[in-house]
Image (spheres, rainbow, N blue to C red):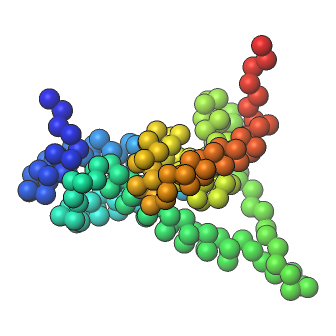
Amino acid sequence: MRMCDEDLMLQFQAGTVEAFDILVSRYRDPLTNYIYRFLGDMKECEDLLQETFLRVYRNRHSYRRIAKFSTWLYTIAGNLARSEYRKRKRRRLFSIQSVNRDAEEYEVEIPDETFSPDKHTESTIQDHYIQEALNQIPEEFREVVVLRDVQQLAYEEIAQITGLPMGTVKSRINRGRTKLQMLLKDIYTPPQS
């Protein structure tokens, strides 16, 4: 019989480290997907995944069963991802923006030469475009779209994870989806009937 996450967490709080190992194995892949979709960088994703589980381990006694374990876990991962995204955004502003002779700021485009379509399958190519589009939409939309459409969490759980009212969650998901559709409209055209 499969034990629920909340019972495993109670066992872990009581000192059973194997319960923690089971939780890590259950959530490693979904959290990797969530963090990667949020940041778009696998190395940073792996670092944040490790930091998320480290925080769960260290703060295990602060978990209360009143919340679903997954909500608590995604809240930790989401907070870390948002912090990293803001840090990266500040770093990028300093490294990509420059000043011309007229003291006006301008952005320097840095081409991505790492993508080679002949070495990837069609699904990998589509995934690349989706990730690029996700990276282009504002953070507040990206987070809720990833939680809903990639992680397939319920609106209620997304509201708990983000601390946003339900109406705001639904609005941001719709606006995020609309922005993604606009960015991806030239990539995917539905079949004509």
Question: How many numbered discs sit on the rendered protein?
Answer: 0
From what the image shows, is residue 181 above or below residue 160? Answer: above
Kindly indicate the quadrant of the structure image that contains residue 91: bottom right
Between residue 65 and residue 108, name the one nearer to us.
Answer: 65
Give the residue at the far top of this rendering: 193
Please tell me whether residue 183 is drawn above or below residue 94 in the rendered image: above
Can I make out residue 37 in this image?
A: no
Residue 70 relative to residue 111: left or right: left
Picture residue at 76% right of the left edge, 28% below the top: 189
Q: Position of residue 75 (x, y in %)?
A: 39, 58
For the point 70% across and 44% down, the residue is: 178
Left or right placement of residue 72 versus residue 125 in this view: left
- Quarter of the picture containing the C terminus is top right
Of 73 and 167, the residue lying toward us: 167
Q: Nearer the viewer, residue 101 or 16?
A: 16
On the image, which quarter does residue 102 sit in?
bottom right
Residue at coordinates 65% horizontally, 35% vertically from top-left?
126
Tell me, yes or no, if residue 177 can be seen here. Answer: yes
Residue 39 is situated, as x and y percent measured from the top left of the image, at 54, 56
Residue at image coords 22%, 65%? 62
Q: Position of residue 93 (x, y in %)?
A: 68, 74
Residue occupying the far right of the picture: 102
Q: Quadrant of the N terminus?
A: top left
